[in-house]
Amino acid sequence: MSEIRTKVQFVDIDDDMAGQRIDNFLRNQLKNIPKSVVYRIVRKGEVRVNKKRVKAEYKLQAGDSVRIPPVTIEEKQEEAPISTKLNKVAELESQIIYEDDHMLILNKPSGIAVHGGSGLKFGAIEALRALRPQARFLELVHRIDRDTSGILLVAKKRSALRHLQAQFREKTVQKYYFALVMGKWKPSCRVVKAPLLKNEVNSIVRVNPNGKPSETRFKVLESFEQATLIQASPITGRTHQIRVHTQYTGHPIAWDDRYGDRRFDAYTAKVGLDRLFLHAANIVFMHPANDEKMEIHAEMEPKLQQAIKKLKAGV
């Protein structure tokens, strides 16, 4: 078994690097080194900022000097790099719906996770990096579920990442999803406020009085015989929030493998559905470079559009 050896590095932090935690900074600098090793060298005081030990949560400041120690680990059998010829990887290039020097916006297909992990070799961000090896910086601004399609923001500069994530934290970003839910949604049900608690063992989220405050706003777009197309706008950003809030009201989303209803899945299969009908369709935010208002729309994939047409026709 071979070894990975890194050399000692000295990095001067500029304005674009400032603001990030030292552990996240190190994980970017030591890309092939396991996360556990990164945290260990910080904990043992081997990483120095301005010649002093720091904790993992330390936030870098412009002008800091970081010493990254040499690291040696045994290398597992080398995995082949992500092939840009894989259909799912190659498809992402055509799904970029906006791009400039500061960011790109992806209409992420359903079935692709936003990042690798938990047995997944790659996600959207790893695929984008493979497609653009020359890119110095590509980082997720936020996340959406693997089976949810639609808008995903990716920063191309650290300054853009900080600016956009600040908007998400301050809840000034407006996000609108389309969802097909079971039954007749009452137009009078416009807001659901129900605290959500995540089970850390299986990641199942439930409404629980001990959970975190959560709010989603809803609007009926179209009603069908046994289903409703709704617009959902999450005010808070909890895991699986829209999926759990719709289930909580008695109207689970079509083809939701965690919170859905198999009877509704069987019904919607008749109109060609075989995936979660949740799509991040619209987003409104301020551009990170000039603070101009941005409104982006992402089309639903043909399968979802066809399902709606068939429901309208009473199929």
Image (tube, rainbow, N blue to C red):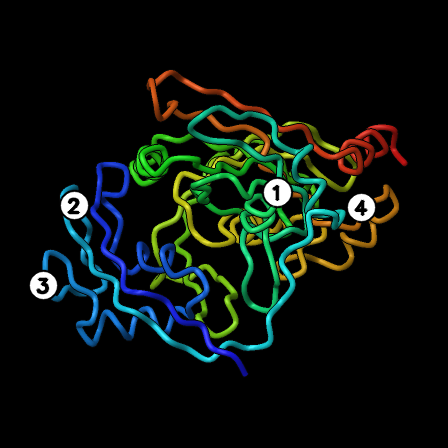
Q: Position of residue 256 (x, y in %)?
A: 67, 55
Identity of the residue drawn at 31% across and 54% down: 25
The answer for how far apart the CA atoms under marks 4 and 2 are is: 50 Å
Q: Could you say whether the residue bearing mark 2 is in a helix, strand or loop?
A: loop
Quadrant including the N terminus: bottom right
Residue type beneath disc 2: Gln
The answer for how far apart the CA atoms under marks 3 and 4 are is: 57 Å
Q: Could you say whether the residue bearing mark 3 is in a helix, strand or loop?
A: strand
Mark 4 and mark 2 residues within 8 Å of each other at the beta carbon: no
Q: Position of residue 164 (x, y in %)?
A: 36, 34
Residue 273 shows which numbered tag?
4
The answer for how far apart the CA atoms under marks 3 and 2 are is: 14 Å
Q: Could you say whether the residue bearing mark 1 is in a helix, strand or loop?
A: helix
Question: From what the image shows, is residue 187 above or below residue 243?
Answer: above
Sequence order check, earlier mark of 3 and 2: 3
Q: Quadrant of residue 266?
A: bottom right
Residue 131 shows which numbered tag?
1
Mark 1 and mark 4 residues within 8 Å of each other at the beta carbon: no
Question: From what the image shows, is residue 117 above or below residue 225?
Answer: below
